[in-house]
């Protein structure tokens, strides 16, 4: 990991701040077992921990800290509290809590739409345990149906046709045709690579991950390969195009780190089920926020972090000063947790004072080990569920048109198809490279506030979840031009010439700043299982910690964000959460 704050910058910062910070250590002050003075309540203007970012990893981290036994916390090996509750504040640049979880509901609908993360898997132990602990009601989320539509290269098919190579408009090799006929096109990547990596055929979960970490292909460690580089040598271009089209996520055929992308591809075994929260995925961070605030924490909105500096605290320990945009005052803290995606971290690094060049380069290298990847979502509301007349009901249809995935939203939350209760909603879900197509048709809506703030504010602690859902709908309305093009492509996918016009729509393009991506992927050459630990505290002698989905070994999922937050908690000497057994309700992600 990077180390060594620049001595000149550190001393200069300490000297210039001495009149405000350097309180004397009294002769009878409390001392640790090592003989060093323990922090006291002498300066209540210093936070124990400042958390920057109110996404799921940030608000979860803050909740864990403020409800922890303060005597257990260690920052750079030093105790923090003499028995009082920890002082923890979350600073969020926008006006909402949730980050890339973004639940919304129209004023006259009961269905909740997910513009960000939408589901979790029964195998996601941290999420499942947290949902159970917080007693958040949830239900099954159903993803597929044999009669759903498939439109590829202008040919209309049904999902049940995908196992028949003769019907597919792709020129597959005999071996690829055999693979498709037995298992469908989704397993083409596995069929192509199983001779190079025999463990793909029988290993799962942690055993598979350990196998891939140690694997070599063509005399080179697997993690040094991009997945596309391997596929170019083991499967036809036609087969790769087919599997990308039918999986619905083009990234699974891209050139990200082969180890981590294969784990994404093989993550879920057939017995895994998917689930959604009854109150929307935002119900999770909102519940954590309420518990955090009830325990004495505070969330400050419209606080855009502009810089970080090391400083000397009254007890002689190393702390940090946070500088914010506009009229927000600087904040001093014993430690800071940066619960942020890669893009804002990259923007922050040049304003991170006091780092040696070596530390700055090392930190920059760690940041560059992943790449943000864009995503686009839109919910279109219709007067009736006209698509049912074409024989579809729940799950999603797929196409190689820019809409890519078309989800029958209301019915996908029910085990059996029935009446849509007048709530006819379709979700369009597109990823790279189709996001650029939609980005040209209207504002992205990922960030509804300006990227700089004039003042910090703490919201009311009695925020109503229903009001938040409706506000998210209001602030993410889709432009007419974008909706018209979405409607045209939805009709084409369903093979109909006309249908009722949409009533309204909401959308978000996660390629926009400050997120710059819906999720992240590890680059080739990176050993993610090592970097994820290094990023938890990227600079050895500075109490600065990093968490979030970006640098997890389960990218694209809330489970990954929580896993990195737990790594940071370990660095702070907090005991691990007890992960409860998975409860299955019905088909119980």
Image: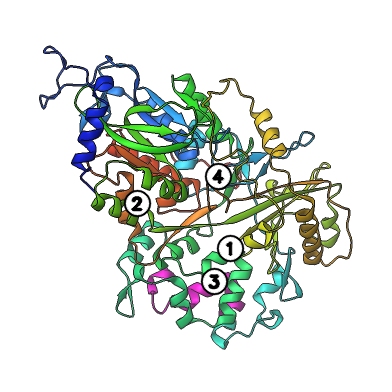
Distance between the Cα atoms at labels 2 and 4? 20 Å
Q: Is residue 400 above or below residue 272?
A: below
* Rendered location of residue 222, percent (x, y): 35, 70
Per the rendering, the mark at residue 187 is: 3
SS for dot 4: loop
Whether residue 174 is visible, yes or no, is: yes
Distance between the Cα atoms at labels 2 and 1? 24 Å
Q: Residue under circle 2?
A: 532
The part of the chain drawn in magenta is: 179-202
* Dot in front, 1 or 3: 1
Lower position in the chain sequence, tag 4 or tag 1: 4
Distance between the Cα atoms at labels 4 and 3? 29 Å
* Dot in front, 2 or 1: 1
Identify the image quadrant of residue 104.
Answer: top right
* Rendered location of residue 195, percent (x, y): 41, 79
Q: Residue under circle 1?
A: 432
Lower position in the chain sequence, tag 4 or tag 3: 4
Check contact, mark 2 vs mark 1: CB within 8 A.
Answer: no
């Amino acid at each position: 990991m990077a180390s060594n704050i620049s001595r000149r910058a550190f001393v200069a910062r300490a000297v210039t701040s001495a009149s405000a910070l350097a309180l004397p250590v009294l002769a009878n002050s409390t001392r640790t077992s090592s003989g060093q003075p323990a922090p006291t309540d002498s300066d209540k203007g210093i936070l124990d921990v400042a958390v920057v970012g109110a996404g799921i990893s940030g608000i979860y981290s803050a909740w864990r800290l403020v409800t922890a036994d303060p005597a257990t916390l260690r920052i750079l090996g030093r105790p923090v509290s003499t028995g009082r509750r920890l002082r923890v504040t979350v600073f969020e640049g926008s006006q909402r809590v949730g980050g890339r979880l973004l639940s919304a509901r129209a004023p006259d609908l009961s269905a909740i739409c997910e513009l960000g993360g939408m589901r979790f898997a029964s195998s996601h132990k941290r999420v499942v345990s947290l949902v159970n602990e917080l007693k958040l009601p949830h239900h099954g989320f159903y993803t597929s149906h044999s009669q759903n539509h498939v439109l590829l290269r202008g040919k209309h098919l049904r999902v049940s046709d995908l196992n028949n190579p003769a019907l597919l408009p792709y020129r597959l090799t005999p071996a690829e045709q055999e693979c498709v006929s037995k298992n469908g096109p989704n397993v083409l990547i596995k069929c192509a690579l199983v001779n190079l990596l025999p463990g793909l055929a029988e290993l799962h979960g942690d055993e598979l991950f350990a196998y891939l970490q140690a694997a070599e292909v063509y005399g080179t460690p697997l993690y040094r390969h991009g997945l596309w580089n391997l596929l170019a040598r083991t499967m036809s271009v036609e087969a790769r195009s087919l599997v990308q089209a039918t999986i619905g996520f083009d990234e699974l055929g891209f050139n990200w780190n082969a180890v981590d992308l294969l784990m994404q591809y093989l993550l879920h075994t057939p017995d895994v089920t998917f689930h959604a929260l009854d109150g929307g995925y935002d119900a999770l961070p909102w519940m954590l926020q309420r518990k955090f605030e009830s325990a004495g924490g505070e969330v400050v909105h419209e606080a855009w972090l502009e810089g970080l500096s090391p400083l000397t605290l009254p007890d002689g320990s190393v702390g940090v000063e946070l500088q914010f945009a506009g009229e927000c005052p600087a904040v001093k803290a014993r430690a800071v947790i940066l619960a942020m995606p890669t893009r804002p971290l990259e923007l922050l690094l040049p304003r991170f004072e006091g780092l040696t060049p070596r530390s700055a380069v090392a930190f920059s290298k760690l940041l560059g080990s992943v790449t943000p990847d864009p995503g686009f979502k839109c919910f279109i509301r219709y007067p009736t569920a006209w698509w049912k007349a074409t024989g579809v009901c729940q799950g999603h249809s797929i196409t190689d048109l820019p809409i890519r995935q078309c989800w029958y939203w209301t019915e996908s939350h029910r085990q059996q198809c029935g009446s849509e209760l007048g709530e006819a909603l379709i979700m369009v879900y597109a990823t790279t490279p189709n996001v650029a197509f939609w980005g040209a048709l209207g504002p992205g809506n990922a960030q509804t506030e300006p990227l700089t703030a004039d003042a910090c504010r703490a919201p009311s602690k009695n925020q109503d979840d229903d009001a938040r859902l409706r506000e998210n709908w209001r602030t993410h309305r889709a432009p007419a031009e974008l909706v018209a093009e979405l409607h045209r492509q939805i009709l084409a996918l369903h093979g109909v010439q006309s249908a009722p016009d949409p009533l309204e729509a909401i959308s978000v393009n996660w390629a926009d700043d400050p997120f710059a991506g819906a999720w992240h992927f590890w680059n080739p050459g990176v050993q993610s299982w090592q970097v994820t630990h290094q990023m938890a505290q990227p600079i050895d002698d500075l109490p600065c910690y990093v968490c979030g989905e970006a640098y997890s070994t389960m990218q694209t999922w809330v489970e990954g964000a929580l896993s990195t937050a737990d790594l940071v908690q370990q660095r702070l000497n907090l005991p691990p959460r007890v992960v409860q057994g998975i409860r299955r309700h019905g088909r119980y992600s």
